[in-house]
Image (tube, rainbow, N blue to C red):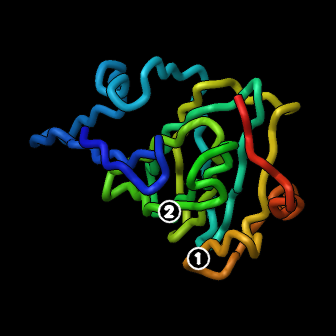
Amino acid sequence: MKFHATPIAGLWEIETAPHADARGSLTRLYCATTFDEVAPGLRFVQVNHSITARCGSVRGLHFQRAPALEAKLVRCLRGRVFDVTLDLRAGSPTFALWHAVELSASNQRQVLIPPGCAHGFQTLSDDCELLYQHSARHTPACEGGVAHDDPRLRIGWPLPVAELSARDRAWPCIEAGFEGLTP
C-alpha cells in the first residue's frame, strides 16, 4: 500500500497493490502495522456496505459528533464514485475545505478519513458498491450532516444530482458561527 497525503491533514488516498496470477488476484486492504504509521492506534469496530443503483446519486455529507467521532476507511467495490471529504474539525487550518478523489473498482484506491470530517459521494456509474470501515459504531444521537449543495462549500459535483434521500436533502448548510467538531 502507498499512502498519498492530501491538502487536508490526516486524510489519505491509499493506493493498493493487487497480486495477480492466473487464478485472479489478492489485495491487502488493511494492515494495522502499516496504518499505524499514518493513524496511530486506529481500530475499526464496524463495517458497512452500501449499494447505490443510479448514476448521479448523492449520499452525504455525513458525520458523527463526539463522543462518537469516527475515522473511516472507504473503498469502492463496484462502479465509480466522486468521493468527498469535508474538514469540520475545530481549529483545523483547512476547516470547511473539501477534497475529492475518484474511487472505482478499477483503480482500487481507498481513502482514510480522519475523525471530525464529513463524508459523501456521488455515483459516476450505475450500481455502485462501497465498503466502509468505521472506528466508532454508528450512534444515532451523534449523527449529523451538511447540505451537499451548501453555497459556502462550492463542492464541484461532476453530474446533476439524480437521487438524494429526504434525510440528506434536510441537512442544513454550515451555520455562521459554527466552530467545528471537537473530540
Q: Amino acid at mark 2?
A: Ala
Asked whether the beta carbons under mark 2 and mark 1 sit within 8 Å of each other, the answer is yes
Residue 156 - label: 1
Residue pictured at 34% horizontal, 45% vertical = 14
Residue 58 vs 130, above or below: the answer is below
Residue pictured at 62% horizontal, 72% vertical = 155
Residue tagged 2: 100
> Could you say where residue 78 lies in the image, as x and y percent from the top left?
45, 54
Residue pictured at 76% horizontal, 70% vertical = 150
Question: What is the spatial separation of the Cα atoms under label 2 and label 1, in whole angstroms?
Answer: 9 Å
Residue 4 vs 159, above or below: the answer is above
Residue most extreme to the bottom: 160
57 on left or right of 38 = right
Mark 1 lies on a secondary structure that is loop
Residue most extreme to the left: 22
* Lower position in the chain sequence, tag 2 or tag 1: 2
Mark 2 lies on a secondary structure that is strand
